[in-house]
Image (spheres, helix red, strand yellow):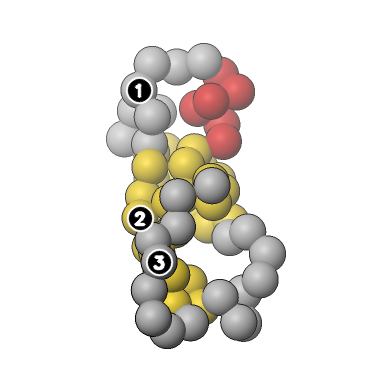
Amino acid sequence: MAKKSKGNRIQVILECTEQRAAGIAGMSRYMTYKNRKTTTERMELKKYNPFMKKVTLHKEIK
């Protein structure tokens, strides 16, 4: 869920897509900020997943 703030920057949660599809226990999540005006679509970043021990694609969740 996005945290409400006064400015254009909001806090978002990124979750691993590969781990969810594989059905591996645990969940790799990262918290970051994005500018709501310049980045209107959902973010996708490659981040390290400690459960799978490799870099995977993480997408923004609601």
Q: Residue at x 35, y 55 (%)?
A: 31
Q: Position of residue 16 (x, y in %)?
A: 49, 38
Q: Quick one: which residue is furthest to the left in this view?
A: 50
Q: Position of residue 26 (x, y in %)?
A: 35, 23
User: To which residue does mark 1 refer?
Assistant: 26
Neighbour tally class for label 1: few under 14, some 14-19, many 20 plus, Cα within 10 Å: few
Tag 2 secondary structure: strand
Give the quarter of the image for residue 22.
Answer: top right
Q: CA distance from mark 1 to mark 3?
A: 27 Å
User: Which badge, 3 or 2, comes first in the chain's sequence?
Assistant: 3
- Establish if 31 lies above or below 61: below
Q: Residue at x 58, y 56 (%)?
A: 44
User: To which residue does mark 2 refer?
Assistant: 31
Q: In the rendered structure, which amino acid carries the disc numbered 3?
A: Lys
Nearer to us: label 1 or label 3: 3
Q: CA distance from mark 3 to mark 2?
A: 14 Å
Q: Position of residue 14 (x, y in %)?
A: 46, 49
User: To which residue does mark 3 refer?
Assistant: 4
